Image (cartoon, helix red, strand yellow):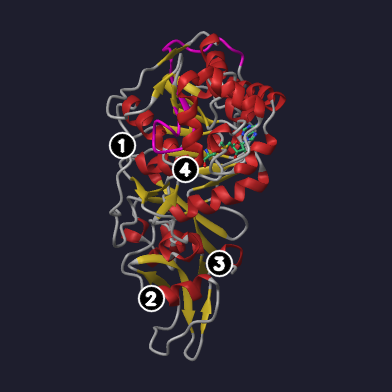
Amino acid sequence: MPELPLEFVEQMKTSLGTDYPRFEAALNRPAPVSIRYNPSKLAVDFPPSGEKIPWTEYGYYLQERPKFTYDPLFHGGMYYVQEASSMLVEAAFRQTMPSADGIKVLDMCAAPGGKSTLLASLLGNGSLLVANEVIKSRYHILRENLSKWGWPNIVSTSSKPESLGGLEGLFDFVLVDAPCSGEGLFRKMPAACDHWSPENVALCANRQQSILEHATRCVKPGGILVFSTCTYNELENDGSANFIIERGNFGKVDIETTHFPGLTPTRLGYQCYPHKVEGEGFYMAVFRKENQSFPGKGKKKKKGGKSLKTFKKENIKNVLPFLQKQGAELTFFQGREDEIRAIPTNIFDGVPQLMNQLPFIEAGVSLGLLKNRKFIPSHELAISNLIANEFPCVQLSTPEAIKYLKRENIHNNEWPKGWTLVHHQHLNLGWIKPLGNRSNNYYPKEWRIRN
Ligand code: SAM
């Protein structure tokens, strides 16, 4: 049982009344374990046999917590370990977006990437996801998780909300999964109790409203803004959501929840409590921007600016065999120095605008380095959905795959020479390069299993 701050206990007793003992009892039970699988990476044994989470197509409860670190499928992006309540964002998306095709989605506070990977799984043809994490040290884990998820229609960035707000009226669906006091995580992360104080709650509410101010700008007229937190605190939840209403051009959207037993409606949103749903504390409110344009000042679109160097297919002939359909539906462009990247052609047009407005972006998938026409494929390509299915590969058992993921030496004299994909249960884990009597292990050093 986490040692709950006294003022928090008083606050919960006031808001829950006679339900408080059930809430406290739930905090004494272990938190449920849940995962959400990647619909683009169907290896074996998926979907799992556990109980399905009612508000999401791809989420399941597990009977017990396995050692995810020692599951190669986890490292290959076959699934994401995500707390069940937070998958409710899927219901907001499915119930408000008339089509998943040809839309632009922004996840404004994205690291470590739980909701970005969820949103990516919901997007259809010609749709773009921009995943942002302002804190640089947290951006890397976001990028790692997006790379493992493997979808090419994502642009990641580390930008301030002000810069994103400058993309006025661009997005059909904006999620602000805001930094908060984390009351809903006290059971899973008791250390969060130590950082809780009424002063910190007030600070969080102010920060949320400042983020929301910019988020409201970049929603398209008629588009959706979802605000969520992992707290129960009214000041941060309905309090900050009320700020959206006060902007004057957003209306509350009701979500159909009859199939989601236990969800508690609040004045402006929905609250998950651990004594009423199988999940942690989570709050979500959904708003639609009215159709007339926003009266605020906003930044003007930057004109001109940086441009992207693109590659013609005839100049990258040695890259194409690595790609599904020889990269037929992709546009190729330069990333850093010798880096070559690819993004679906039907969303490429949106990239220069993002590049000019935001200080830093990584668009699509890094394919590798092209130096003097010699191509060195990237790890991101190996685990992406762009990689050619028929590329040479070696199948590894679980113990062999763990050795590979620890970046240890593995070799078999019968393996084909040259760039070879490492497979575990038909899921790509990365590259290996057998040279005859030994093999080079190309698993990224910074991602390796360390113990
Ligand atoms: N959406 C993420 C997921 O599902 O994995 C979790 C996001 S977490 C609740 C909130 C994020 O907001 C953190 O990654 C934090 O670094 C970021 N953040 C902190 N201060 C911020 C600010 N002033 N503006 C925008 N984001 C901020």
Q: Bounds of the magenta span?
A: 272-297
Q: CA distance from mark 4 to mark 3?
A: 30 Å
Q: In percent of the image, x 53 and y 76: which residue is there? A: 441
Q: Quadrant of ligand 1?
A: top right
Q: CA distance from mark 1 to mark 3?
A: 33 Å
User: Amino acid under label 2?
Assistant: Ser
User: Amino acid under label 3?
Assistant: Ile
Q: Which residue is mark 3?
A: 449
Q: Which residue is mark 4?
A: 29
User: Amino acid under label 4?
Assistant: Arg
Q: Please determine whether, in this image, residue 222 is positioned above or below residue 109.
A: above
> Which quarter of the rendering shows the N terminus?
top right
Q: From where the camera sits, is residue 393 visible?
A: yes
Rendered location of residue 321, percent (x, y): 37, 67
Q: Secondary structure at mark 1?
A: loop
For disc 3, does the CB lie below 8 Å from ligand 1? no
Which disc number belongs to residue 54? 1
- Dot 4 or dot 2: first in sequence order is 4
Q: Is residue 90 magenta?
A: no
User: Amino acid under label 1?
Assistant: Pro
